Image: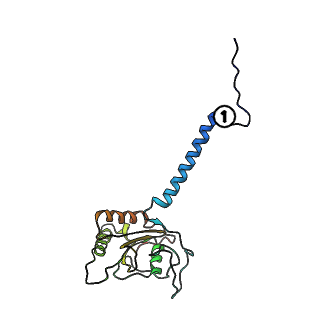
Amino acid sequence: MAVPKRRTPQRGGIAPHRWGIIVGISVLAVGLGGWAVYSIYFAKPGIAIPIQQPSNYELRLGETVSYHSVPPTSGPRAGAATDWGIHDRPIPNEIQVQMLWRGGVLVQYRPVESPALDDPVAEGLKRLIGRLRTEHFERYCKVIVAPYPSLPKKIALTAWGRLDTFDAEEITPDIERRIVRFLDKLIDAYNPGRAGCP
């Protein structure tokens, strides 16, 4: 009776059981890479806007900047700041960037053309942010609500390097959740100077 010959792996090749290990490692690497991209660009609300350089530059009095987004989300900033909370007048872009650099979030709206007309979006945003700041001041201290007449959409949410713009006719529960998620994820997400809230 003939004895079967024992197979020996060929030199220079990969043993069949090692292919599984190689494939497994490759799948894991692709998965981790996908998770990293998702975490950086998609897990946070809004869209990522490239950081405008120089991002650590304080403008001198009278200097202005042309920003990459409307409203701005990064770049050179004013040396002055403004108060957190609800504003009835637009905030200059350079001061907006200063407030974002301090870890803040701006909730801005395109006002109606005539002051005589009702603006349910403006009133709804003021009510929402006023309520959040009253009920949870420490959490929502660094929020500003203000008009921004040149917005392409009705509402813009900005944080350092993030932007979410959308249209609305009123502040519905779904829109409230969208705004609160933006605030919860991005307040103080970027605050290199460790600025506190007065």
**Left or right of 128: which side holds 6?**
right
The secondary structure type at the circle numbered 1 is loop
Q: Position of residue 120 (x, y in %)?
A: 27, 74
**Left or right of 45: which side holds 128?**
left
Displayed quadrant of residue 187: bottom left
Determine whether 97 is above or below 4 in the image. below
Displayed quadrant of residue 70: bottom left
Q: Position of residue 151 (x, y in %)?
A: 40, 76
Q: Dot 1, how many residues are within 10 Å of its Cα: few (below 14), some (14-19), or many (20+)?
A: few
The C terminus sits in image quarter:
bottom left
Q: Going by the picture, which residue comes out furthest to the top?
A: 1
The N terminus sits in image quarter:
top right
**Left or right of 41: which side holds 183?**
left
Determine whether 172 is above or below 33 in the image. below
Q: Amino acid at mark 1?
A: Ala
Q: At 51% from the left edge and 70% from the top edge, which residue is drawn?
A: 192
User: Which residue, given by chain and number where applicable, does mark 1 sit on?
Assistant: 15
Determine whether 179 is above or below 37 in the image. below
Q: Going by the picture, which residue comes out furthest to the right?
A: 11
Determine whether 107 is above or below 21 in the image. below
Q: Position of residue 94 (x, y in %)?
A: 48, 80
Count of numbered labels shown in the rendering: 1
Q: Nearer the viewer, residue 141 or 20?
A: 20
Q: Going by the picture, which residue comes out furthest to the bottom?
A: 62
Q: Position of residue 49 (x, y in %)?
A: 50, 68
Coloring scheme used? rainbow
Q: At 52% from the left edge and 57% from the top edge, which residue is drawn?
A: 37
Q: At 31% from the left edge and 80% from the top edge, which residue is drawn?
A: 112
Q: At 56% from the left edge and 49% from the top edge, which residue is drawn?
A: 30
